[in-house]
Amino acid sequence: MFEPRVALASLSGEADAEWAREGSDHAGAAFLGGIALDDETRAAARKMVARDRSEFLPPDPLSFVEDELDALADVPIRPGVNVRSATLEPVRAVAAACAERDAIVEINAHCRQAEMCAVGCGEALLRDTDRLCEYVAAADEAGAAVSVKVRAEVSGVDLTTTAREVQSAGADAIHVDAMDTESVVGDVVDAAPDLFVIANNGVRGPESVREYLQYGADAVSIGRPSTDERVRRRVHGAVEEWFGEVGTA
């Protein structure tokens, strides 16, 4: 899906094209966003901004996504766009824009902010597997590569079931925030062998990289430290070392 197998995970209100360009020295993919696409999620985002959260709120989300992706046309990194929407049509539209630019559309079933959950996004979407699969299928039908961002340790959610279901719905990747349960990555790998599994949470250097890759992850992603060149270099070096060892084993 991307090389090197290091991704930069979306950062609320910060992960834009310039951020991806700066991180392209040691990463193979960068997930822009998250982007609130429709009226309900944009209203939720405004409420979050009012309490000092950072959010992208461009006048036209689709045009914003297209412009940001176009700004990366000359950058050696595969872009993705992490999206939140209470309705399907905006997801289809962004997925089509991503398909035209060889970008990944990432369905956000991860956000735990109360305002987003109240409109059926983030963790609320993670708890509704049938609806999540509708989003995945819509994005897949638009021709885009589809990732689903999920979080471990959510009450009532079995990520192995989620992984199997989104795989069947047409997802290409699952981006797992392992929280404090790193072994869940191995469970997801076993449950959905056709998914490209990106492991996230606490990725800082060789120890964390090797732990996730030993569980079978196909790649790792860097969250908040993605703006730190030293962390990117350490993670990239550990990933390249691991796959070099695997390739010569």
Image: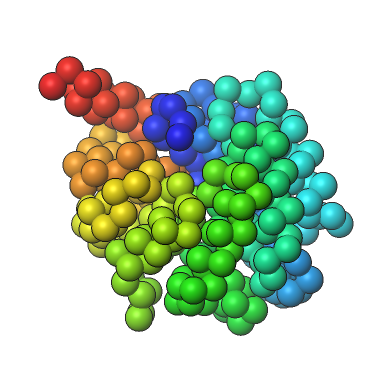
- Image quadrant containing the N terminus: top left
Q: Residue furthest right?
A: 59
Q: Which x, y percent locates residue 54?
A: 67, 59
Residue for point 78% across, 71% down: 39
Q: Is residue 51 left or right of residue 104?
A: right
Residue closer to the observer: 71 or 222:
71
Residue for point 46% across, 38% down: 7
Q: Which x, y percent locates residue 151?
A: 40, 64
Q: Which x, y percent locates residue 13?
A: 66, 54
Q: Which quadrant of the structure image shows residue 210? A: top left
Q: Is residue 13 left or right of residue 174?
A: right
69 relative to 131, above or below: above
Can residue 181 be seen?
yes
Residue closer to the observer: 135 or 9:
135
Q: Which quadrant of the structure image shows residue 218? A: top left
175 relative to 131, above or below: above
Residue for point 17% across, 17% down: 248
Q: Which quadrant of the structure image shows residue 119? A: bottom right
246 relative to 20, above or below: above
Marker count (numbered) = 0
